[in-house]
Structure formats: structure tokens, C-alpha cells
Image (cartoon, rainbow, N blue to C red):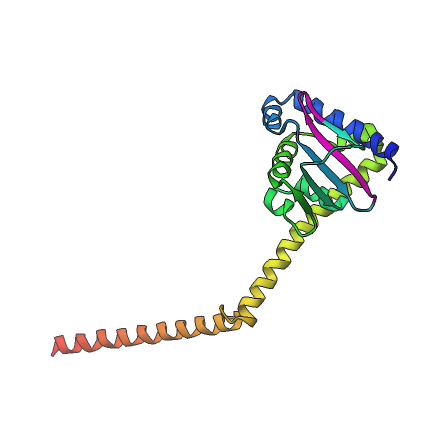
Amino acid sequence: MNEMFTSSLCAPVEAIINAVLKQDPGSALQLQAFRGKVLRVECTSPIKLIVHLVVEEQGVSLRSVFEGEADAGISASASSYAKLLSSDSQTGALFSPAVAISGDTHVVQGLHRVIAGLEIDWQDHFASVFGDVATHQFSELVSRAKRWGKSSRETVLDNVEEYLHEEARLLPSKSEVAHFSARIDELKLRLDRINARTQRLGARVNDA
């Protein structure tokens, strides 16, 4: 990806982040804890580009070219970055196998926490910068990421349950639970009958 395109992409996003930071003193203060730090952000697909996020005194600077050494780096596909924006779990999103992190992980976590915590309507901002078509595609990407995350969690839970039931035999199967429940009901019925007989015999003894 040529530097001109990357620069044209960085400028509006940088402006959006800094504008929101001015309206959010708390996040701006948290960001200053990383003043001078540099994060190398790489997108691997569907387009390849590299951006350096530099924390400055008045906010952040997004650069397509950076001569120095970054303090940390993060590399992922566009869909994985969409999940980072939509995920409720920072640990689960950042340390996914689909995301590669290098350098100081505290820098990555801290910057992600600050930026993800900003109340930014990305769809509205992107519409004014890139147009409705590109914005719609981005929104669809985020929506698919959310659906994928929910589907993945359900699949994992189903697989774990199947393993515990069928492979490890640590939990009974549904049929075994039903059979056990039926046996318990049968045993309870027998105890009720024995109890009733005992009461009748006791009554006869008292009458005698």
C-alpha cells in the first residue's frame, strides 16, 4: 500500500480521535501516561498497510512513515481489528490467535483501553470521510465480527459439553440423566408406599 493512500487514511482518523479526546479529559489524562510511546499498527488483509501511532502532548499522531523504533506492535486482519472495536473483553480480543502482539504489551493494552473507551460513532465519522458505501461495508464487517464472536462462543461451549459427556465421561449424558431421574421417581414412589403401609400397621397395632 503506497504511503499517499495510507496518509490520506490516517489524517481523518487522527482528527476524529483528537477531537474526541478534547471532549474527554479523563481519557486524555490516561493517554498522557504513554506520552512519547509509539505503536506500530499493521493491517494484513484485505489490504496491507502499516501505521505508526505516536502519543504526543496534545493527543495522538498517526504516521505512514516513522524512522524510529516502535515500543510495541500489533498485527491483524481488518476483521480482527473490527472485533477489537466491538469486543467487551480486552484480554480475549487482544490475545486472540488472530492478533500478533510484539514489544511492550502494556503499551498495547493501555492504548487499546483508552481508544476503545472513547465514545466515537465511527460509522457517522467514516460516512463523512469515506462515503456511505465504504461506511456500510465497514459496519457490515463489525456486525459480522460480533456474530462470529457469538457463534464461536456457542460452538466452543457445545464442544466442551460434548467432550465432558462423551469423551471424558465426566458428566452423564442426557439419556443417563433421564434414566437416573426416572429411577429416583420410582424409588420415591416405593418409599411412599412403604410409609403408607407402616402407618396402616401402626394404626392396627394401636387399635389392638
Q: How many marks?
A: 0
> In this orientation, does residue 89 appear?
no
Horizontal and vertical percent position of residue 17: 71, 27
Q: Quadrant of residue 14?
A: top right
- Left/right of residue 25 with respect to residue 121 in the rendered view: left
Q: Residue furthest front?
A: 68
- Left/right of residue 107 with respect to residue 10 in the rendered view: left
Front position in the image: 118 or 95: 95
Front position in the image: 183 or 62: 62
Horizontal and vertical percent position of residue 50: 79, 39
- Quarter holding the N terminus is top right
Q: Identify the residue at image location x=13%, y=75%.
A: 206
- Left/right of residue 155 with respect to residue 126 in the rendered view: left
Horizontal and vertical percent position of residue 170: 49, 69
Q: Residue furthest left?
A: 208
Front position in the image: 134 or 106: 106
Q: Which residues are magenta?
A: 47-60
Examine the rendered structure and indicate whether residue 119 appears above or below residue 22.
below
Horizontal and vertical percent position of residue 54: 71, 29
- Quarter holding the C terminus is bottom left
> In this orientation, does residue 59 appear?
yes
Examine the rendered structure and indicate whether residue 117 appears above or below residue 21.
below
Magenta stretch: helix, strand or loop mostly: strand
Examine the rendered structure and indicate whether residue 16 appears above or below residue 178.
above
| 59 inside magenta stretch | yes
Q: Identify the residue at image location x=67%, y=44%.
A: 102
Q: Identify the residue at image location x=53%, y=70%.
A: 168
| 65 inside magenta stretch | no
